[in-house]
Structures are given as structure tokens and as C-alpha cells.
Amino acid sequence: MATPRVLPSGMAEHKATIRWTLGQGDFTKGRYSREHIWTFDGGITVPASSSPSVVPKPYSSDAAVDPEEAFVAAIASCHMLMFLYEASRAGVEVLRYDDDAVGTMTKNERGVAWVSKVVLRPRITYGGATAPSRDVEDRLHHAAHEGCFIANSVRTEITVAPPP
């Protein structure tokens, strides 16, 4: 299994290989498959595609991960990992963490679509004698947001909301 390359600054490089090949279709007329493969340094391969909401079928696949879904998942995953870290440091035992994160696309000031907002809705099951107070849980979420590498890399508004 490959590990990220550590840079002189102490930070790391993370790599992904993206592969697409023209199959059938008419490329110059936009009638070609957007399905492709993501391969990560650990060896896992993920089927990817444009979203069918952007490029209609049969030129996209709803069975594959689209970049916008991956973006939302990366934000939610990073927040969860930092939340677990902060909870463990605070002595708060977490038994389960589920999140149905939702990203919303809007148009920016130039009329270009972007993922402008991601709402995280974590449902957390705590162990131990008592669950943390709402105030402690809010502080843990704030610390998780402040420490999340992905949240610190984007201008998308990220909020934590109670589960529906």
C-alpha cells in the first residue's frame, strides 16, 4: 500500500489518477461517455462519471460517483474524522457517527455553477455514562470545522445542522 509523500514542510502530497478513454460516440458533437476511473495511491479504484443532472444518460452514469458527490463526501468525511479526534481528546466516547451530507449548487457572480453550500447532518451515538451537552457538542463541531483540511481549502459555506 502506498503512503502519501511527506514534503520538506512536514505536510504531505496526496495523489489520484484519473483515466478516461473514448469509447463509442461522436466526441466533437458531445455524444460520448463521461464515465471514467479514479485510482488512489492505496490501490482502490472507483467508477466515476459526470452527474446525470449535468450530462444526461447515456453519456453519464448514476451508478458512478460524480465530482460533486465526491466533494461533499470529502468535506463530510474530513469533518467526521476531525470530530472523532476532538471528541477523543475531550474524553467524549463516540460509538457511531452517521451523516447525510447535502451539497447545494448555485450560480456564482459570473453565472458559473458551483457547490456553494454543504450542510452536514451528523447523528452521533455516544458511549459512557452521559452524552455531552449541546454546548460541548457544538464546541467539538466548531473545533472539527476549524481543523478540517478540506474545509480550510474551499470557499464553500459549510454548516452543521441537526438531523431532520
Image (cartoon, rainbow, N blue to C red):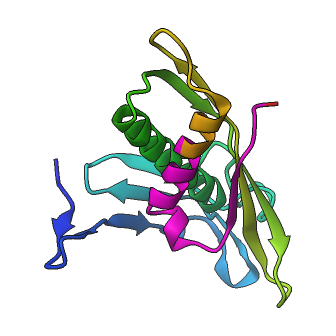
Taking the view exactly as shown, the residue that stands out farthest to the bottom is: 110
Q: Residue at x 61, y 65 (%)?
A: 24
Q: Is residue 148 visible from the viewing direction of this image?
A: no
- Find residue 101 and report its image quarter: top right
Q: Position of residue 44 (x, y in %)?
A: 33, 46
Q: Is residue 154 magenta?
A: yes
Q: Is residue 14 left or right of residue 53?
A: left
**Relative to 74, residue 106 above or below:** below
The reply to whether the magenta stretch includes residue 16 is no
Is residue 2 depicted above or below 14 in this figure?
above
The one nearer the camera, 136 or 153, is 136
Which is more toward the observer, 41 or 115? Answer: 115
Query: Which image quarter holds the C terminus?
Result: top right
At x 70%, y 53%, the residue is: 159
Tell me the residue at 69%/85% (across/down): 28
Q: Please report the residue visible at 58 percent of the width from the left and 72 percent of the height from the top.
A: 154
Left or right of residue 64: residue 149: left
| 66 displayed left or right of 84 | right
Task: Read off the magenta span.
Answer: 140-163
- Residue 83 point in image, percent of width and height: 48, 41
Residue 38, visible in the rendered structure: yes
